[in-house]
Structure formats: C-alpha cells, structure tokens
Image: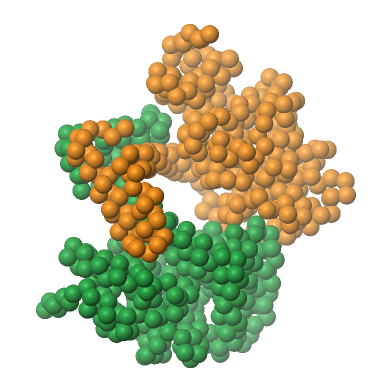
Chain colours: A green, B orange
Amino acid sequence: RKRKLLQADEYVKGILDGNITLLSQAVTLIESSNPEHQQLAQDIIIKCLPFAGNSTRLGITGVPGAGKSTFIEALGKQITGNGGKLAVLAIDPSSERSKGSILGDKTRMESLSSDPNAYIRPSPSAGSLGGVARKTRETIVLCEAAGFDTIFIETVGVGQSETAVHSMVDFFLLIQIAGAGDELQGIKRGIIEMSDAIAINKADGTNVEKANMAASQFRNALHLYPPTESGWIPKVLTCSSLNGTGIIEIWDTVSDYVEQTRKNEFFSHRRREQAKYWMYESVNETLRNDFYSNPEIKERLNGMEKAVLNDEISSFVAARRLLDVYFKTFESNGKKPE
Amino acid sequence: RKRKLLQADEYVKGILDGNITLLSQAVTLIESSNPEHQQLAQDIIIKCLPFAGNSTRLGITGVPGAGKSTFIEALGKQITGNGGKLAVLAIDPSSERSKGSILGDKTRMESLSSDPNAYIRPSPSAGSLGGVARKTRETIVLCEAAGFDTIFIETVGVGQSETAVHSMVDFFLLIQIAGAGDELQGIKRGIIEMSDAIAINKADGTNVEKANMAASQFRNALHLYPPTESGWIPKVLTCSSLNGTGIIEIWDTVSDYVEQTRKNEFFSHRRREQAKYWMYESVNETLRNDFYSNPEIKERLNGMEKAVLNDEISSFVAARRLLDVYFKTFESNGKKPE
C-alpha cells in the first residue's frame, strides 16, 4: 500500500510545527532511492535549512559492550528532564552492521523511546558509508527544524564511520570501559585523538577503582597529545549509566565546550568547515563511484592490480593507464557517464 | 646546456651497477615534467622493478628542532659503518616548505654526504603532495635497484606529508624531544598513533632525566592505544644524536620489527597494500584534479561554496549541481578532458 505523497510545503509546515509523523515521513523520503522521493526530500531540506542549526550535535562512539545504549538513555533522560528535546540518530552502514550491535534501537532504549521529547531514528538500513552519512546529515537538518535542540549521532566505533560522525558533530565523545586490555581490541587507532571527551562507563560497584585508574591513565595520555585546533583540552570522566552517577558532569562538559568554542568562534568555524567538507567529499565520492563502476574499468581493474602486485608495472603507471581508458569512454560515448 | 639523454637500458645498467651519477640523472628524469623525460623515467622504473624491494624503508618525522638531521647522521653512520648502503630521501611539498626547515640537505648532513655508502637526495622542489609523493616513491625503486639496502624517508612532521610517508615505508619513527609542552605544538594529531616507535632525542647532559620521564609517559600512553594491525607493540626509546647513545638500540628496534613482521607475514602484506593504495590514490587524485581544474567548475565553485555556507542549499545538492555541470562538459566536448 503506497502512502500518498504530500507537497513539500505541507511536510515543512508539519516539521516546523514539531509534527513527528510528518518528520518521520520526510526522513523516509531522504532515505528513499526513488528519484521522485529524492527530489521532494531536497525541496523539503532547502526549505528547512533556514530553521536548522540551532542544536548541539554530539557524536557518541564506543565498541559494543561499552554500554552506549544505557548511556544514551541515562544522558537522554537528563536532557529531556530539563526540558530539552533530543533526537537520537545513528550511522551504521550495512557493511559494518554485522560487526556492531545496532539492533532494534527502540527496544534497547526503552524509556527514551516512550519519551515525548525524544525522537529515536535508527540508522538508514542500507548503503555505503557515504550514502548513510549523507542521509544522517540531512536528517539532522529536519530534526533541528522540528525543534530538537540536542542531536546525538551514535556509531558503533569499529569501522570507518567515526570520521564521518566526527565531521558532522560539534563534540565527539568516546565511551570506554575500565581495563585497557581486551576491551580496546575493537577500537580503531585514531579515535582517541579525535575525541573531545572520554567517558569511562560502568564506574559502579567493584569497578569504581578500576574506572578511576583508567581515567587517570587516559588523562596522562591525553597530556602528551598536541593541542586541539579548538583550544579545548579533552576531558576524561567516569560515569555509571546504571546508577546515574557522573552523567550530568558529562553534559556539563559538553556545555562548557560549547560555551568556550562559541566564545572563541571555533564553534561556527567548525560548522562551516563541515558544510564545505561534505560538499567536497560528496563530489569526490561521486567521481570515484563513477570511475570504479565504469564497465571498462571494472573489466581491467583486477588485472592491473595484479600487475602492480607482481611488480610488472608501477602503481602510478597502472593508474595512468586506467585513467586513459576511463577518459576515452567519454570520447566514444560523448555523453554523461551515469 | 642540455645534457644528452641516454637510452633507458643504459640508465638501468648504470643503476644496477651502483653508478650514482646515472642514478641521480634517472631521478632527475622522474622529477621532470617534460613528457619525454617522463616516458623515459617510466621505462627505467619498469626495468628496475624486478630488482627493487630488497630494503628496509624507514619513515622519519618530527618537528623542526627535534634534531632530525643530526639523528639521521648518527643513525646513518652506524648503518654505513656496518657495511650497509643508505639512501636518504625526503618528502616536503613546496606548500609545506616554509613551515619546515629542509634547507640544504647536504649541508645539514655533512658527514653522511661525504660517505660513499650514503646517497642523499633532497625532496623534489615543486609540486603538490601527490606529485612529490609519487616522485619519492619511484625514487625508492631506483635506489633499491642500485643496491641501497636501507632507505630513509624524512618529512618535516607539520603538514599532510606524514600519511604519505607512512604509506610508503615499513617502519615509521617519530622523533620527539623531552618536555611535552610547547615542543608538541607543531605535531599533527594522529601522528603518535601511526608511529611504530618514538625516539626521545637530545637525551644528554642535564636533559637525561626529563627525557626518561617523557619516555615513560609516552610508554604509558601507548599502552592505552588499540593494538596495531601488525601485532607490533610500539616502542619508546631515548637517544642522543650528539653523543651517540641509544642510536644502535633504535636500529635494533627496527630490525626486531622487520624480523617479527616478516615472520608473521605482515611485512609483505603491508608492502602489497601500499602498492595498491598508491594505484588507487593516484587514480583518485587525478579524478579530483580533473574536476577542480575544469573551467566550468572553477567558475562556479566559489559561488556554490558560498551558497552552502549561507544555508541556501545543502552540501549534497551543491555537489550534485557541480557534478552535473562537470559531466555535461564531456557531452558537449566529447573529448578527453585534460
């Protein structure tokens, strides 16, 4: 049964009124691959853009088992309890899904999902990282236009998505648990250096001492890092999502960050850089996709890769030959290669 | 006065014989933008490829003032003193040159430059990072074919070049100095996490204690990092290039790494991944260059970027519109867009 589409203006009016049903339908249009839906979605986004931007965007990452869901519940309830409106989005490309655990977002965040001031939208279910990132970024615009003043973007922290999340949030939070051994196995190198804060979760019961020790180790480690562009010194905190301790302190830290970076204007600088980044990134991604999906290239790519691996040809000459083939297909077709 | 070019085979024979004059002339061909030189260079490279690969490739980075030159001299003399043959190359795109200090490579490495078993080649002096990286990577091939069993690739450690260097070496060494404060200012975030070892240099005189403390801090910090893909645990060492202490231990560390990763086959795995990486990276770079140097794009890019920054249009729609313009230029021209 197909639902009849409304006009762009009807969606926009609904979204600006905070109508969650229409917001959800508009997000579904963003996620659709149907060209008509895509066009409608873009019309809606353009009309929502002037009303967007007024939120704090918080990226949250951590390996499965770090307790992200309960943490999001605990922090989320604090935010809505103080009158805030929270949207929880996720980036989790299908290729990474099996490694993670983003299953049934609404079940795993039971109390938030029944909270009228919270909106939980699971990750778009299919597509490349670039596609999923685009959809999530555009969903942020609609959520902000709908009046959500806090946006969480969650990712599972084991794949390539962290950079994408980092490029669309104001503050990047890494959830860790005590015991710097096996628990770190899944985390990608580089994540620690892009974090604005690290929360050592599950600091409860017999775990408190271990968590404090881990926190102090991380604090010492962060000391050795070069200063951030924002002037912000990354913080390390402990918390327990279970009994609610330390959660408000994490939110205070985010607020401090926002205040400090708004004062030194890094906040808007970063947002502008991100907007530019996504324009360039999506140009570059499309150029790559067009090249690698070209039938002539597909036919030759494996062989060329093998020649490189067998030292029959340098990497650069191999690239040059493929590019010659690619640009020649335009000559013979003389048409838009899509 | 133009030097007459030899045949590819003559250069190759000279290189395989270890003739430094012919090696240098061939490297000059690699660096030339003259198409005839380029063609000749590629012929030489292809013929040298079967004789390349038998070296340890060591990336060395650190901010100006960390003592890279004296370190390279100290380590280099140890290597040639033990009968090794060492080539010292650099990656230092012109855009980053002003930030760094790569001036007169031969002057600043006086004793190595008069060493018959060392070959010092300054960074190609002009060009984009991609271009400079290509030239350096191809120069490695010729140096290896000429019998150099150790290759140093030096970079200044303040720009974008570290990733390029990391992608062409077996082992990545970060030179630091004690005092984790101001000295770190110039280092880019992310470098620490890609290092296979950190050497705290200038551990001499009254500095020894500070250096040891810095080393132990770094050791604790590295503990908190996720394990490396190679299974190697990054090491932190102290050294003094001035009085020669700790230098041999650093070389032993590199040798341990090579031994360990050859055993678990990560060594050849990484080399193969690097060869593939450079093929794909140079395809992608050319695609980008072709797009951004397209006159129609150049004309519109600024305006589109402004529209994005003023929230008149989403980043993704802006990208789409530029791509439509770009691909249309092929339709109307129907020819190779270079």
- Residue B183, position as x, y percentages in the image: 72, 51
Q: Residue at x 32, y 56 (%)?
A: B318
Q: Is residue B319 visible?
A: yes
- Residue A69, position as x, y percentages in the image: 45, 80
Left or right: B171 in relation to B183:
left
Q: Residue at x 38, y 59 (%)?
A: B308
Q: Quadrant of residue B39?
A: top left
- Residue B120, position as x, y percentages in the image: 64, 26
- Residue B33, position as x, y percentages in the image: 45, 24
- Residue sitting nearer the eye, B105 or B335: B335
Q: Residue furthest left?
A: A1
Left or right: A283 in relation to B90:
left
Q: Is residue B166 visible?
A: no
Left or right: A85 in relation to B321:
right
Numbered circles on residues, count: 0
Q: Residue at x 58, y 31 (%)?
A: B123
- Residue sitting nearer the eye, A217 or B24: B24
- Residue sitting nearer the eye, B193 or B284: B284
B167 relative to A176, above or below: above
B199 relative to B35, above or below: below
Q: Quadrant of residue A139?
A: bottom left
Quadrant holding the C terminus of chain B: top left
B316 relative to A70, above or below: above
Q: Residue at x 67, y 22 (%)?
A: B117
Left or right: A15 in relation to A7:
right
